[in-house]
Image (tube, helix red, strand yellow):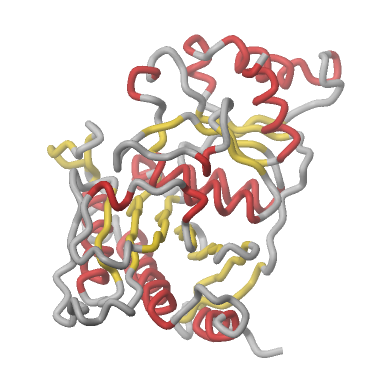
Amino acid sequence: MTAKTLPVYLSEKQQTLDHLNDGLVSVLLDIAEACKKTAHAVNQGALTHSLESLDSINVQGEKQQALDVISNDIFLAFSDQNPFVAGLVSEELPDVYIPKQVHKPSTNQAAIKRYLLAFDPLDGSSNVSLNISVGSIFSVLQCPATVQEPQAKDFLQAGKYQVCAGYAMYGFSTMLVITLGEGVNCFTLDQATGEFVLTHAEMKISPDANEFAINMSHQRFWEPPMQRYVGECLQGVEGARKKDFNMRWVASMVAEVHRILTRGGVFMYPIDSKIKAQGGKLRLLYEANPMSMIVEQAGGASSTAYKRILDIAPDSIHQRVGVVLGAKNEVDLVSTYHKG
């Protein structure tokens, strides 16, 4: 059987998905190219001396890695050349970025649909010096038809309005996982041909799980319902859940979600007393929303522990939220405990 490449897959899906027009296909193919280039930069990190931390601090108040800046610049460069990208927001930029396209649609081309891109250019970048999997996360929204140069308010759309979402994982192989709102599919980069090839079709998450991922060093800051849930998991067969759980933590959301897609489980970065004032740890537009869309499309669930993430109307482009996502029955149980 001939391997199905990403361009072929998208061409076939255009026959059945009304929203998958030539413009959106163009955006997705450029995102894929940006991911390939970022994968190369990550793989060459030690050889190009780009694994070091910089003296600069990004808009999140976090110390930047050299690869954070490199990967961000790669995504900006591909957006600059794509006439269908109206604007983007990034974890590494304080404000909206307007691409410098040479062929930007004019006002008399209102029929041309353009898109807003929100992305985390290098999720888990603190792991790059450890040779642990890192990745890129992206979300694509429809740009309002009458808007030529989008502002922050144009990005403040609930996650349920995403037209597609995905992530790339840079590990022992480079993988691109996408959802077009109709299931989840994973493509692996064939180094011989330079093409992303469909390797994992229609990925699904089991509703039950015996594995959870959370940063236990924050336990003393958790709210009581989260203390209860994790405590019951740790009690194993002797506790209220009557079964043993494995615990994992990689400090890379891409790696955590990919593990859930391949073998199940639940990932949690809950709101706690240390980060409550800022709303949580993970960013809504370019981390929580795209990952929530992927997880839900694979049959899982995603919540802040109090409400469905994809229903949240954002109030800023860098808004943060608590995140609980993965196996539906586990996410529902966490939510039940929090709603008390």
20 to the left or right of 147:
right
Q: Quadrant of the C terminus?
A: top right
Question: Residue placed at 63% from the left, 85% from the top?
Answer: 3
Nearest the viewer among 264 and 303 is 303
Q: Residue 166, relative to residue 224: is it above or below?
A: below
Q: Position of residue 188 (x, y in %)?
A: 55, 70
Q: Quadrant of the N terminus?
A: bottom right
Query: What is the total number of numbered labels drawn onto the structure image?
Result: 0
Q: Residue 127, relative to residue 139: is it above or below?
A: above
Question: Residue placed at 72% from the left, 21% from the top?
Answer: 233
181 to the left or right of 58:
right
Nearest the viewer among 157 and 321 is 157
216 to the left or right of 320:
right
Quadrant for residue 105, please give it: bottom left
Q: Position of residue 218 (x, y in %)?
A: 48, 17
Question: Residue placed at 43% from the left, 31% from the top?
Answer: 321
Q: Position of residue 45 (x, y in %)?
A: 29, 57
Question: Residue placed at 63% from the left, 65% from the top?
Answer: 182
Q: Position of residue 164 (x, y in %)?
A: 49, 62
Quadrant for residue 145, please give it: bottom left
Q: Residue furthest bottom?
A: 2
